[in-house]
Image (cartoon, helix red, strand yellow):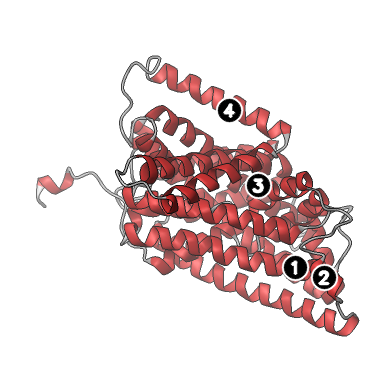
Amino acid sequence: MDPATTDVEPKLKRALGLRALVLYGLVLTQPTAPMPCYGIVSNTGKGHVVTAVLLGMLAMLLTATSYGRMARVYPSAGSAYTYVGRELHPIAGYLTGWAMIFDYVMNPIICSIWCSKAMVKLALVPGVPFAMWAVCFVLLFTLLNVRGIEASARSNAWLAAGLGLVILLFLAAAARHLVQVRAAGGADVLRPFYDPETFSFSGVARGTSIAVLTYIGFDAVSTLSEEARHPQRDILRATVLTCLVVGILAAVEVYAAQLVWPAWHFADPETAIPQIAGRIGGDLLLRTITLALLVATIGSGIGSHLAAGRLLYSMGRDGALPARFFGTLAPSTRIPRNSILLVGALALVGVLVLDYDTGAQLLNFGAFVGFMGVNLSAFVRYSLRPRSKRLRDAAPPLLGFLVCLVLWLHLGTSAQLVGIVWLGLGLGLGVWQARGFRRPRPEA
């Protein structure tokens, strides 16, 4: 063997086409994503779940366009961290990446929590406690992601097919119930979108800030820029398609659910969709939907775990985190094995000390910070820097930034406080590591 070839640093493998990227995005965001949070959004927005989902889709489509356009310029695994750092300032990029750690790491944590609770509730294996299931799911996510990117893509295809089938079963059962049991009048048909008796802007905005959880994860498509065959073309397409498909499916699902169950308040909001499934299809559909949500959440946990590893690898490679640990790839699989294993260790701790609601709020805090940063970066790149400044280039990222800011301000106070403390810790770490930011930070 030529000695020179042994010194070449391994690189991420370009193995993913548009189809694989979209499947990855769909499985990570989950076409069934509005189902677990349906009851919470309904209680918060006093119904209007469809409106919240559609408003969230608008915000995410604008943001997805910004992600895709920035990926054309910087086809890097660092995603938001890279875009903000290169376009605005390295310190801003560092803080964005630090905030996005909340998003990418909290997702596998809340997925593990939900899956563990579902297994205990279903009692498929009686006697196994929550903690044991939590450890099993964290290990599952970690082991699947250390296999390599092509194996993950094959898993995504099967998961996407299964989720599509379950959604069809739910919609078919809802349609049959509406035809056999009741005929929806005009008022009933429109009430999921707007109910004058309960509508308020603040309530819908709060509901939308939670409903955005439906789309969380679409941005992780951009973390695969270095593994896409044609990143300048396919990342934008895959990101927008992911948001659009998930948004349409989510709106149809929650619309059908609201027609079947017009009451907007749920005493047990986390199980709202299984309750509705039980009404329209009995115990069999209830268990089927619960199992489907379990499969969907497993897929989301695997994908978000993968994305978290890519983010940490990119920050380590650039020197924002210790490069010796974070900035290396496994020679055989060409994946950031150290980062993936660390995320697994953090998830193992998180599932034992956090609850689902806390983890979800922290996830949304980091996500909105990243979304605002990417929109602002796209605005600067395509509207301020070019000689020819056009409104059609300025409007989408600026509008996306403003919508995300409004939704971020409607998050829970506790989530904002904890998130700000997290940003403060990150800033302190950056000051210490870069000697008060007097030492130039490496470009992403």
Along the polypeptide, which appears first: circle 2 or circle 4? 2
Point out residue 166 in the picture as x, y percentages from the top left corner. 67, 73
Point out residue 240 in the picture as x, y percentages from the top left corner. 48, 60
- Pick the residue in front: 66 or 152: 66
- Quadrant position of the C terminus in the picture: top left
Q: Can you tell which quarter of the image residue 197 is in?
A: bottom right
Question: Which residue lies under the disc numbered 4?
Answer: 422
Element type at marker 1? helix
Q: CA distance from mark 2 to mark 3?
A: 29 Å
**What kind of residue is marked 4?**
Trp
Task: Please state if 294 lies on the left or on the right of 380 as rendered.
Answer: right
Q: Measured along the vertical axis of the image, is residue 355 above or below residue 167? A: above
- Pick the residue in front: 334 or 180: 180
Task: Please state if 170 lies on the left or on the right of 62 as rendered.
Answer: right
Along the polypeptide, which appears first: circle 3 or circle 1? 3
Task: Please state if 174 lies on the left or on the right of 182 as rendered.
Answer: left
Neighbours of disc 2 within 10 Å: few (<14), some (14-19), many (20+): many
Q: CA distance from mark 2 to mark 4?
A: 41 Å
The circle on residue 259 is: 2
Along the polypeptide, which appears first: circle 3 or circle 4? 3
Q: CA distance from mark 2 to mark 1?
A: 6 Å
Q: Are marks 2 and 1 in contact (CB under 8 Å)?
A: yes
* In front: label 2 or label 4: 2
Q: CA distance from mark 3 to mark 4?
A: 18 Å
